[in-house]
Structures are given as C-alpha cells and as structure tokens.
Image (cartoon, rainbow, N blue to C red):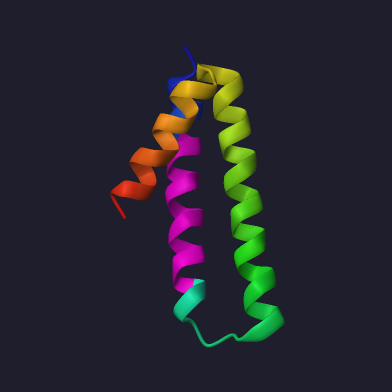
Amino acid sequence: MYESEIARLRKRLEDEYEAARRGLTGLAAGAAQHRFITARIRNMERCHKRLAQLVGEERATAIALEVWRTR
C-alpha cells in the first residue's frame, strides 16, 4: 500500500506534536507562542487528513491517538 507515506506522516505527527508541546514551555510568550502552536496544530491536521485519505478516518485517528498517548 502506502506504507512509507504512512510512516512518514506518523513521524511528522510525532515531530509536530513534540514541537507544540515544547512551544508551551519555550521562551516565546504571548502571540508569538500562540502562532507557533497554532501552526503545529494545523500541520497535524494536514497529516491526519492525508492519513485519512490513505487508511480511512478511523485508522488515521487511531494513529494520531497512538502518537499522542506515547508522548
């Protein structure tokens, strides 16, 4: 199927989630911090949307939850 793309998207979800989490405790504050975290969330949404196209909505959500639960 699209195993390599699925793996790439999962890794991207992991990276974006970690970046957003670090953004909460980083040096930036206020609007800059909000924009940074919002951008990470939008990137995660795009990854989820593409995953849903490849494996279906239910499996894409399961993959995203796996990423978030293991962090």
- Total label count? 0
How far across and down, in percent of the image, does residue 58 sit? 48, 22
**Residue 12 sits inside the magenta stretch:** yes
Vertical relation: 25 (above or below) 36: below
Please state if 71 lies on the left or on the right of 30 as rendered: left
Instruction: Quadrant for residue 48, please give it.
Output: top right
**Residue lying farthest top?**
1
How far across and down, in percent of the image, does residue 35 sit? 69, 70
Vertical relation: 33 (above or below) 68: below
Start-end of magenta stretch: 8-22
Instruction: Quadrant for residue 3, please give it.
Output: top left
Q: Which residue is at a point 57% across and 24% down the rendered structure image?
A: 52
State the quadrant of the C terminus. bottom left
Vertical relation: 2 (above or below) 42: above
Vertical relation: 57 (above or below) 34: above
Residue toward you, 6 or 45: 45
How far across and down, in percent of the image, does residue 15 sit? 46, 54
How far across and down, in percent of the image, does residue 27 sit? 52, 88
**Residue 58 sits inside the magenta stretch:** no
**Residue lying farthest left?**
70
Which secondary structure is most common in the magenta stretch?
helix
Q: Which residue is at a point 28% across and 49% down the rendered structure image?
A: 70
Q: Which residue is at a point 62% across and 43% down the rendered structure image?
A: 45
